[in-house]
Image (cartoon, rainbow, N blue to C red):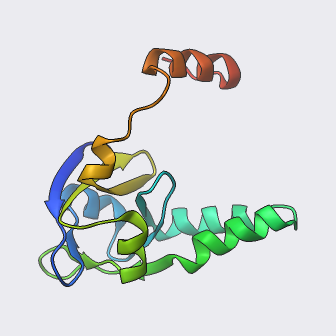
Amino acid sequence: MFMGEFNHTIDPKNRVIVPAKFREGLGEKFVVSAGLDGCLYLMKNEDWESFAESLNELPINKESRQLVRFFMRNAQECEPDKQGRIIIPQGLVDLAKLEKDVVLTGAGKKVEIWSKERLDGETPEESMEDIVEKLSTEYGLKF
């Protein structure tokens, strides 16, 4: 389970340090991919494979094909160097609008990489209390 938040920078070669706490959970090799809401995902290989299988089980329609294409074409296996850095492909850097300051956040089974500016601008329209109440009612979220 990934949790916590770490502030780092992305260098001119698109390298980002993955905190040791996250590297331990991700393993020696893991997947970096496009995420939702404008971030990137880091996922353990086995979690990525499970996610990819669930994509392949979707019905064959236009939306499903687009979703599969979005995630699969924007995914790549990566391996940290000795300093704990990974290279993020330019297409993903552009997609997430990563410039200098980045934030790595734990998000349960995955780590999210955000542009600090973009994450700071993430303000839900609903309050967290309203969201918790809604999810508790609809999905049985226990708090």
Residue 62, image quadrant: bottom right
Counting from the top left corner in percent of width and height, residue 57 is at 80, 64
Side of 69 where 121 appears, left or right? left
Residue 61, image quadrant: bottom right
Q: Is residue 124 visible?
A: yes
Query: Eyeballing the image, is 57 above or below 93?
Result: above
Query: Eyeballing the image, is 118 above or below 132?
Result: below
Of 141 and 125, nearer the camera is 125
Counting from the top left corner in percent of width and height, residue 92 is at 41, 74
Q: Residue at x 37, y 55 (%)?
A: 111
Counting from the top left corner in percent of width and height, residue 139 is at 67, 26
Side of 44 where 19 appears, left or right? left
Q: Is residue 2 visible?
A: no
Counting from the top left corner in percent of width and height, residue 98 is at 29, 66
Across the whole image, how many numbered discs are drawn on residues? 0
Side of 9 where 4 appears, left or right? right
Q: Residue at x 66, y 74 (%)?
A: 69
Side of 9 where 88 appears, left or right? right
Residue 83, image quadrant: bottom left
Q: Residue at x 32, y 50 (%)?
A: 118
Query: Eyeballing the image, is 32 above or below 6?
Result: below
Of 83 and 72, nearer the camera is 72
Q: Residue furthest left?
A: 83
